[in-house]
Image (spheres, helix red, strand yellow):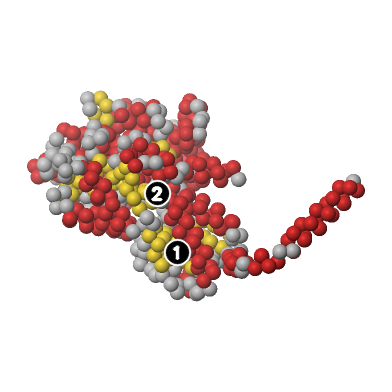
Amino acid sequence: MKPIRTLMAAATALAVTAFVAPTFAADDPGPAAYAQALKGKRVMLVPLAMGFDLAQGWAHYLKKEVDAWGGTFETRDPNWVVDAGAQAITDAISSDTRPDVLIIHAPDLNSYSKLMKKAQAAGTYVILVDNPANFPADAFVGSDWDRLGQLEAEAAIKGCGENSSKKIGLVQGDQANSSSLYQYAGIMKVLDKHPDFKVVAKPDSNWDATTSRNVTTTMLQQNPDICSIIDFWDGDATGASAAIRDAKLDGKVFLVTTGGGEKAADCDKLQDGTYGAVVMTDLARQSGDMNAIIKFLLQSGQPAGTSHTYIYTLEKATTKADLKPESCWDLKALQAEAAAK
Amino acid sequence: MNAIGRPSLRSLNQEGIVFAIAVVLFVAAAIGLPGFIDPNNLVAIVRSVSVLGILALGMAVVIIGRGIDLSAVAIMAMSVAWYLQLLNTGTPDGLAFAYVLAGVLAIGLLNGFLVAYADVPAIFVTLATGSFVFGYVRSQLITQDAVPVPQGHWVELLGGLRFLDIPIEVFVFAGLAFLFFLFLRYTKWGRYIYFAGDNPVAARNIGIPVRPMLVLRYVLSAFVALIAGLLTAASLHSINTRIVNSTLLYDIVLVAVIGGIGLSGGRGGVRNVLVGAALIGILLNAMTIIDIPLLYQNLIKAAILLGAIIVDGIINPRDEQTAQQGDI
């Protein structure tokens, strides 16, 4: 035993000298300041629901970073119920473990405005993600929905081509959600510049796939020569695609939609021709933007509500032709990675 | 009582009124809207209310027996979501289906048992079991709101099935409607449901097995919900459990009630469901063709329902019996 103990003592001594000796090299003040500002801070994500691709993707990337700098990351699942989300935010603000950063996925323009104000007053930074709201948050990270609508319309026009019927159908979400309203505005901006293209119908799906199927069936019944349909979300565009399939118009109607860029939801369906084009959010980059602004806010020392930053995610309409292996992220892989830990 | 087509205004009940509104709307749409009368559009109308109608059949049987099943939509979405999840994680098809059948049976039995033997009001029991089914399956058994159908699975093929260019849902709806009609009209237990719904105490006193029949109705409703869920998944190639939060449940009750099935029990039949479904189907289709925004669609739907109820109230004033018995 003795030689081993000696050896260990020698190794310890060596290690100590190794750390102590080059003191001049440890002078970079960055890491210490960074650790001091961030360590132990709490970040909470309140999405519309935890059960869909975007929220699960954000949570994955945020948790990875927050864990790495020694913070606590939590999520709340309102499961699409606005009241439950409000309750979650209220509880979070008034609890002993009040989050230092609150990331909110707003259901509409106004519902959470008062609560977000309260959160800022209590000293919590508020970051809005994906859906804009009528509130000067510390930062907004997400899509410029107007621009996104323009990209969809451009993809639809390209998908139709010059020698088509130039008839486009829209399947909107609803008339309350900012993402639906701004998307529509963006689409119409582009179509105004192409007066030969006409919107022949613009029903709402209420974000429900069955409704999307029914209204699309009627739309195609009335206008069998539609060359493109824009459905406002990949969550319900499965309904529109079912209607196209049932009408035996596969390949004739160019279906455009938008989504979080998840493999099974978007890339696989571009690959098999269900969707003609999808305007995808680069989720990893969007999460990275959130991570960066969280780190900035926590180190800034400024009171919550001081600055208002807009960080729009770069959007792009992807078609089968420019589909790459890295175009999408894979929820199953992320879940497997989380399960393996 | 049921007086479709009988000329006397006095004998016109809610079913007759709704039927008349549906016919008027149909004629107006056929004349005014291009493409409405097209056979393909008519098929699309029936198809759009097939799943709703199937669920309403199950609900109708429960309501006639003076109950209500608020867990129907949760059972529909969650049973199928669980089934697809099992398939996606590699469980053999037969075993997965057996699990789901057992689960659906268990929830139907639980509903029935709590209502029949524990004497808890149906509205509370099914509200609770519905939330339980949703919460348990969503949190413990599946990982996503939307669960896709595995490629090439029979559910996917079912969705592509057509006879005479008519989707399979339409035939399933028609077949189930016919079976329910036979059950309610010509079987002993079917007739008993009316007695039990009209006056449970008297039905029990004359020796009708009121409680086991109650259990049977909730089991029936649960199985009908499973069928509706499978058809939804077949058509969309996935099931989205968000539907549990939608207004579908109210639409089911609406179809049954607008067709004239009284919430106080003992009245109505399959025909009422068909009339209610026809009105909703024609209305939604016509409004979509005219391109009316969803907000106004809901307003118009609600206005027509209110109108039907008010006209019913004027033509058929409440009598002593309904006053004593009361509605839900």
Please name the residue shown 50% across and 59% down the image: A291
User: Looking at the image, which residue sits at the far right?
Assistant: A2
Along the line of sight, which residue is nearer the eye, B326 or B292? B292
User: Looking at the image, which residue sits at the far left?
Assistant: B31
Along the line of sight, which residue is nearer the eye, B151 or B42? B151
Q: Is residue A336 visible?
A: yes
Q: Is residue A205 visible?
A: no
Q: Which numbered dot is residue B170?
A: none
Quarter residue A307 falls in: bottom left
Give the spatial CA distance, label 2 vs label 1. 19 Å
Q: Secondary structure at mark 2?
A: loop
Please name the residue shown 38% across and 33% down the image: B230
Residue B58 placement (x, y as % from top left): 36, 37
Q: Give, as a three-letter code, the residue at label 2.
A: Gly
Residue B206 placement (x, y as % from top left): 42, 33
Residue A288 placement (x, y as % from top left): 47, 56
Q: Which numbered dot is residue A127?
A: 1
Q: Give, as a three-letter code, the residue at label 1.
A: Ile
Q: Secondary structure at mark 1?
A: strand
Along the line of sight, which residue is nearer the eye, B82 or B111? B82
Question: Dots 2 and 1: beta carbons under 8 Å?
Answer: no
Q: Which numbered dot is residue A260?
A: 2
Q: Please tell me whether residue B16 is drawn above or below residue A140 in the rendered image.
A: above
Please name the residue shown 17% across and 38% down the image: A224
